[in-house]
Image (cartoon, rainbow, N blue to C red):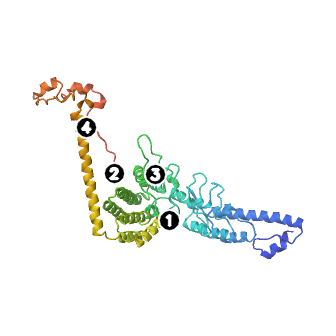
C-alpha cells in the first residue's frame, strides 16, 4: 500500500492511478494523503512564520491537490511584533494565490481579512500581490469596521499607506468618534499611545502620507468628537491634536531617531497649518459667493489655491476651488472665465461627484451665449420703471410720516393719554461741578481706592492679577 502513496514530487499520473483503486482502499489512501498534506502544510506554515520564503515547498504542496488553507496565506504575509519579527514571503504568497488560495482569507487570530494583516505585519510587496489577485482594498476589520488604510496608518506602515492611497482607496470614512484618516495619521506620528507597536515616523514618507490624503480629499479642518465636552463645543482638528501630542511624543527622546523626528515634525506641522488655512479661505469664498460678492469670492478661492500650491498639494481640494469659481463666473456672465476654470479643475484628481460637476459646468459654459444687447426702447423703459419705483418709495415714506404725526401730535391721547407725554415739559439740568471728594461722598463719583486692609479682606475673585502671575504654556516644544 505504501508503494502507491503520492509522494512529494509524484506526478499527476500518480494521482490518477491512486483514484483507480477499489473504493475501500481508495478511502484509506485518501485519508493518508489528507494527513500527509496537513503535515506538509504545517511544516510550510512553520517555515513561513520564521520568515523563510519557501517557494519550492509550497509548489510541492500544491501538486498534492489539496486546497490552500487560509492560515498559509496569512503566514506568508509576515509577522511584526516587539522582540519577535519575521519578514514576509512574497514568492510563497504568489504561489499560494496562483494555487487558488483566497486573497481575502480570514486571519485565524484576528478573524479579519488578510489585507488588514498585510497592512499591519507585511510590506508593500505582499500588499501589491494581494491586490493583484483581487483582494478587497476596502475590506472592513470586524471590530472597528474600518478599512485597511486605517490599519496601515495605525501601524505606521507608510509605504503601504502610500500604495493604498495611490490606488485611490476610500478616505471619506470616520471612526465612531468622528476621527478622520488624518487624525489617525497624526496619532501615529505624535501620540505616545501604543507607540511601541508602530513603525517609527522617519524619512519623507510620513509627510507624503499626509499630503496624499489631502490630495485625495481628506478635510484638514474636520473635528473629532472625543475631545468635545463642557469646555469645548467642538472636538479637535488634526492640527490641534498634533500640537497637543507632539511635545510629549516618545520619538523625540528616542536615541536613534530623535533628531530626525524633530525635523520631520516641523515639516508636518507646517503642512497641517497650510491645509487648515486653505480650507478656511475656501469657506470665506463660499460665504462671499452666497452673499453675491463675486469678486471677493474669487479672490478668497485664489488665495486658497496659492496656499495648496505652496504646500505642494494638488488634487481634490484644488478641483473643488476651480469648480466653485466656474459657478461664480457663470453668475457674472463670464462664460470664457467659467470654461477656463472647468478646464483647470479637470487637470486635478477629484472625487467622482466633483468631476461630474466640472464636466457639466464645462458643457454649460461652452453652450452659453451672451444675452442680446437691449434696444434703446428697452433701456428707456427700464429707466422709467426704475424712476417709478423710486417715486413710489418716496411717496410711501411721506405717507408714513403723516400717519405718525397724526398719531403723536394731533391725537396725543391715543399713545400717552389725555395729558400727553410726561416728558414734554422736561428741562435738561445744567452741568454739576464739585470736588472729587464731595462727589464720592454723595455717591456719584468713581469709587475710592481700596486701602491695604480692604484689599486684604477682599474676596479672592476681586484680587488683582499681575502679569508676572500669569503662566503661558507654549504651543510647541521649547526647542522649536
Residue located beneath label 3 in the image: 191
First reached walking from the N terminus: tag 1 or tag 2: 1
Q: What residue is disc 1 on?
A: 352
Q: Earlier along the polypeptide chain: callout 4 or callout 2?
A: 4
Structural distance between the alpha carbons of marks 4 and 2 = 24 Å
Q: Is residue 125 visible?
A: yes
Residue 73 horizontal/vertical position (percent): 65, 64
Tags 1 and 4 touching, CB below 8 Å? no
**Residue under label 4:** 466
Which residue is painted at 23% across and 31% down in the image? 412
Q: Horizontal placement of 29 versus 290: left or right? A: right
Q: Are marks 4 and 3 in contact (CB under 8 Å)?
A: no
Judge left or right: residue 33 versus residue 375.
right
Q: Secondary structure at mark 4?
A: loop
Query: Does dot 3 land on a helix, a strand or a loop?
Result: loop
Residue 437: percent from left, percent from top: 12, 26
SS at circle 1? helix
Q: Residue at x 72, y 69 (%)?
A: 61
If you read the primary sequence from the N terminus, does the residue marked by circle 1 or circle 4 appear first?
1
Residue ID for mark 2? 478
Amino acid at each position: 500500500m505504501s508503494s502507491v502513496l503520492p509522494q512529494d514530487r509524484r506526478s499527476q499520473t500518480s494521482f490518477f492511478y491512486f483514484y483507480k483503486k477499489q473504493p475501500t482502499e481508495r478511502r484509506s489512501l485518501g485519508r493518508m494523503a489528507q494527513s500527509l498534506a496537513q503535515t506538509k502544510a504545517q511544516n510550510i506554515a512553520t517555515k513561513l512564520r520564521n520568515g523563510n520564503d519557501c517557494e519550492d515547498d509550497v509548489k510541492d504542496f500544491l501538486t498534492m491537490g489539496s486546497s490552500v488553507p487560509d492560515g498559509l496565506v496569512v503566514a506568508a504575509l509576515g509577522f511584526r511584533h516587539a522582540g519577535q519579527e519575521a519578514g514576509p514571503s512574497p514568492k510563497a504568497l504568489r504561489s499560494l494565490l496562483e494555487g487558488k488560495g483566497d486573497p481575502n482569507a480570514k486571519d485565524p487570530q484576528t478573524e479579519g481579512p488578510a489585507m488588514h494583516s498585510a497592512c499591519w505585519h507585511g510590506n508593500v510587496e505582499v500588499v501589491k500581490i494581494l491586490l493583484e489577485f483581487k483582494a478587497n482594498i476596502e475590506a472592513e476589520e470586524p471590530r472597528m469596521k474600518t478599512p485597511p488604510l486605517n490599519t496601515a496608518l495605525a501601524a505606521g506602515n507608510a509605504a503601504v499607506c502610500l500604495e493604498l492611497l495611490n490606488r485611490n482607496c476610500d478616505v471619506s470614512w470616520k471612526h465612531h468618534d468622528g476621527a478622520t484618516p488624518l487624525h489617525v495619521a497624526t496619532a501615529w506620528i505624535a501620540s505616545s499611545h501604543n507607540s511601541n507597536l508602530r513603525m517609527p515616523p522617519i524619512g519623507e514618507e510620513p509627510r507624503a502620507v499626509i499630503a496624499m490624503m489631502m490630495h485625495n480629499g481628506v478635510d484638514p479642518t474636520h473635528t473629532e468628537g472625543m475631545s468635545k465636552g463642557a469646555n469645548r463645543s467642538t472636538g479637535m482638528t488634526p492640527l490641534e491634536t498634533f500640537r497637543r501630542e507632539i511635545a510629549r511624543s516618545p520619538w523625540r527622546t528616542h536615541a536613534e531617531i530623535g533628531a530626525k523626528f524633530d525635523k520631520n515634525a516641523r515639516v508636518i506641522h507646517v503642512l497641517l497649518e497650510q491645509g487648515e488655512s486653505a480650507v478656511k479661505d475656501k469657506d470665506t469664498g463660499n460665504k462671499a459667493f452666497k452673499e453675491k460678492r463675486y469678486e471677493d469670492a474669487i479672490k478668497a478661492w485664489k488665495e486658497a489655491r496659492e496656499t495648496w500650491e505652496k504646500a505642494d498639494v494638488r488634487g481634490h481640494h484644488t478641483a473643488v476651488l476651480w469648480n466653485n469659481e466656474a459657478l461664480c463666473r457663470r453668475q457674472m456672465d463670464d462664460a470664457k472665465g467659467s470654461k477656463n476654470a472647468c478646464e483647470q479643475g479637470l487637470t486635478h484628481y477629484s472625487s467622482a461627484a466633483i468631476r461630474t460637476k466640472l464636466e457639466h459646468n464645462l458643457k454649460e459654459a461652452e453652450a452659453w451665449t451672451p444675452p442680446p444687447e437691449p434696444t434703446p426702447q428697452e433701456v428707456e423703459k427700464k429707466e422709467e420703471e426704475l424712476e417709478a419705483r423710486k417715486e413710489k418709495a418716496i411717496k410711501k415714506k411721506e405717507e408714513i410720516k403723516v400717519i405718525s404725526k397724526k398719531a403723536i401730535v394731533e391725537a396725543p391721547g391715543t399713545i400717552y393719554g389725555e395729558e400727553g407725554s410726561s416728558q414734554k415739559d422736561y428741562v435738561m439740568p445744567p452741568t454739576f461741578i464739585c470736588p472729587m471728594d464731595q462727589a464720592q461722598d454723595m455717591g456719584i463719583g468713581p469709587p475710592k481706592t481700596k486701602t491695604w486692609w480692604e484689599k486684604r479682606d477682599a474676596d479672592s475673585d476681586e484680587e488683582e492679577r499681575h502679569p508676572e502671575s500669569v503662566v503661558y504654556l507654549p504651543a510647541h516644544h521649547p526647542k522649536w
